[in-house]
């Protein structure tokens, strides 16, 4: 499988190089040269296959022969070493819980898969890779955990000061070893802009930089796995399946749409956002006009210019009519998010996190207007990661899982920066 730059179709590379470099030399995102098609018989009998086999079959065409089958199967098995339960919430509505991994966030899957791919690709090579990543919450912790102690790889994580939860901050600032955290005075978009500028900087061209955000294909593509697992578990319900995805940088829902393109029969996708509503407004006006980022309860989705939306447009040949038939997008306020948290907990005895609550709202809005579906919303992080907002709005205490307890008492180590020049100096001195 070859990958081309979305800025220039003539720039093509391998899975290995795309994973190592993160973005193309012209700074475009990589996109697969062709969309593989899964065997129809496999999809028709998906309930007879293990999650590991399903995931291997989904990802193997994108990797090709660049990782031997036995090693790719081991990478998949290590990536999926925790459960992905579908939990009934109300009639025809289910939560897909993606928070049972080491950092209790959906990004564990992509980070674990990517770290193991890079570990394979760099074995025996006498050079170090620096992973430069911006986080609005969970990406940082997942990347830190996934790459902790991996030989020949250093990780530099930028996060917006005061705009991630206490637990999220602990997960990316307390591990030490090859993990370094930079606390940025600004928003997530400021962090992301710094990362993009570093990749454009000619003075850093001799530093082997790559990204572990969902712009990297090795982080983005394995997120397809969730949708296969959900469909497998819900297929027996006998109704078409609609999936609502809490969406910030739009990598997760883009992976879901790719899963559909390669053969998974998900009927429809809902992109559920908070007040950062660039995509919902685009779906109404066909004008892409990002505004200033708004700070919300669902902080991991506080993204006003989602990087992966360009990939979604590419999936549909930049034809709005085709995209509009597959994707619906709704924004929701913090007040609506809090009301959903309270409703689902009191009426259905299910505790969402703020992002899952936004996903629930989008699913319900779509299903109310379009009956006849089995619906699933993604619970992307454990509620304990947002304990303050949960406690304030539901007046309950949340038990602390072992994965979180292990980092709560760690010492925060982070360098504060407020400009790109400070980031550049940090990279050059490493």
Image (spheres, helix red, strand yellow):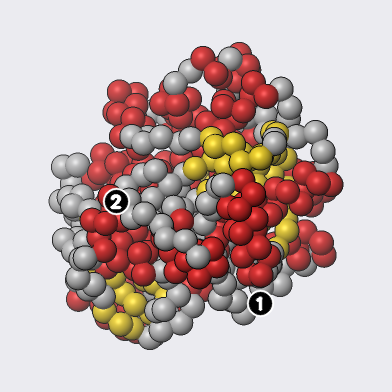
Q: Is residue 48 visible?
A: yes
* Side (left or right) of 243 relative to 210: right
Local secondary structure at mark 1: loop
Q: Position of residue 316 (x, y in %)?
A: 71, 45
* Side (left or right) of 338 relative to 147: right
Real-space CA distance between mark 1 and mark 2, rounded to the nearest whole angstrom? 36 Å
Q: Which mark is residue 403?
A: 2
- Marks counted in the figure total 2
Residue lying at 52% horizontally and 31% vertically, measured from the top left: 229
Q: Which residue is mark 1?
A: 291
Q: Position of residue 319 (x, y in %)?
A: 78, 49
* Mark positioned earlier in the residue sequence (1 or 2): 1
Q: Nearer the viewer, residue 219 or 408?
A: 408
* Discs 1/2, front: 2
Q: Nearer the viewer, residue 225 or 286?
A: 225
Q: Position of residue 79 (x, y in %)?
A: 35, 37
Residue lying at 19% horizontally and 42% vertically, measured from the top left: 123
Q: Identify the image quadrant of residue 240.
A: top right
Q: Is residue 155 visible?
A: no
Q: Identify the image quadrant of residue 410.
A: bottom left
Local secondary structure at mark 2: helix
Residue lying at 70% horizontally and 48% vertically, measured from the top left: 363
């Amino acid at each position: 499988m070859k990958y081309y730059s979305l800025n220039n179709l003539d720039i093509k590379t391998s899975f290995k190089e795309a994973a190592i470099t993160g973005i193309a030399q012209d700074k475009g995102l990589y996109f697969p040269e062709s969309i593989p098609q899964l065997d129809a018989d496999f999809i028709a009998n998906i309930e007879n296959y293990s999650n590991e086999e399903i995931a291997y079959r989904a990802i193997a065409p994108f990797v090709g022969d660049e990782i031997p089958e036995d090693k790719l199967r081991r990478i998949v098995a290590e990536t999926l070493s925790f459960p992905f339960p579908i939990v009934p919430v109300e009639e025809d509505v289910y939560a897909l819980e993606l928070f049972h991994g080491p950092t209790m966030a959906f990004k564990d899957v992509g980070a674990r898969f990517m770290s193991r791919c890079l570990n394979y690709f760099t074995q025996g090579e006498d050079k170090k890779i620096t992973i430069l990543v911006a986080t609005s919450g969970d990406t940082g912790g997942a990347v830190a955990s996934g790459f902790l102690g991996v030989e020949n790889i250093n990780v530099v994580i930028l996060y917006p000061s005061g705009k991630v939860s206490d637990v999220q901050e602990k997960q990316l600032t307390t591990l030490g070893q090859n993990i370094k955290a930079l606390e940025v005075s600004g928003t997530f978009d400021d962090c992301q802009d710094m990362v993009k500028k570093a990749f454009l900087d000619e003075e850093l061209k001799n530093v082997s930089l790559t990204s572990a955000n969902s712009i990297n294909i090795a982080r983005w593509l394995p997120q397809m796995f969730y949708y296969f697992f959900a469909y497998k578990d819900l297929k027996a319900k006998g109704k078409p399946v609609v999936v609502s995805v809490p969406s910030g940088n739009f990598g997760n829902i883009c992976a879901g749409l790719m899963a559909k393109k390669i053969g998974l029969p998900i009927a429809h996708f809902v992109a559920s956002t908070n007040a950062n509503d660039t995509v919902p407004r685009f779906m109404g006006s066909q004008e892409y006009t990002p505004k200033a980022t708004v700070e919300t309860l669902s902080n991991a989705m506080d993204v006003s210019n989602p990087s992966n939306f360009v990939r979604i447009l590419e999936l549909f040949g930049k034809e709005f009519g085709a995209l509009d038939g597959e994707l619906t997008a709704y924004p929701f306020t913090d007040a609506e998010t809090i009301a959903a948290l309270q409703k689902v907990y009191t009426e259905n005895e299910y505790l969402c996190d703020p992002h899952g609550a936004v996903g629930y709202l989008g699913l319900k809005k779509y299903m109310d207007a379009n009956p006849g579906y089995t619906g699933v919303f993604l619970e992307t992080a454990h509620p304990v990661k947002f304990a303050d907002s949960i406690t304030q709005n539901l007046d309950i205490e949340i038990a602390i899982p072992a994965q979180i307890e292990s980092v709560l008492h760690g010492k925060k180590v982070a360098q504060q920066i407020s400009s790109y020049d400070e980031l550049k100096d940090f990279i050059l001195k490493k």
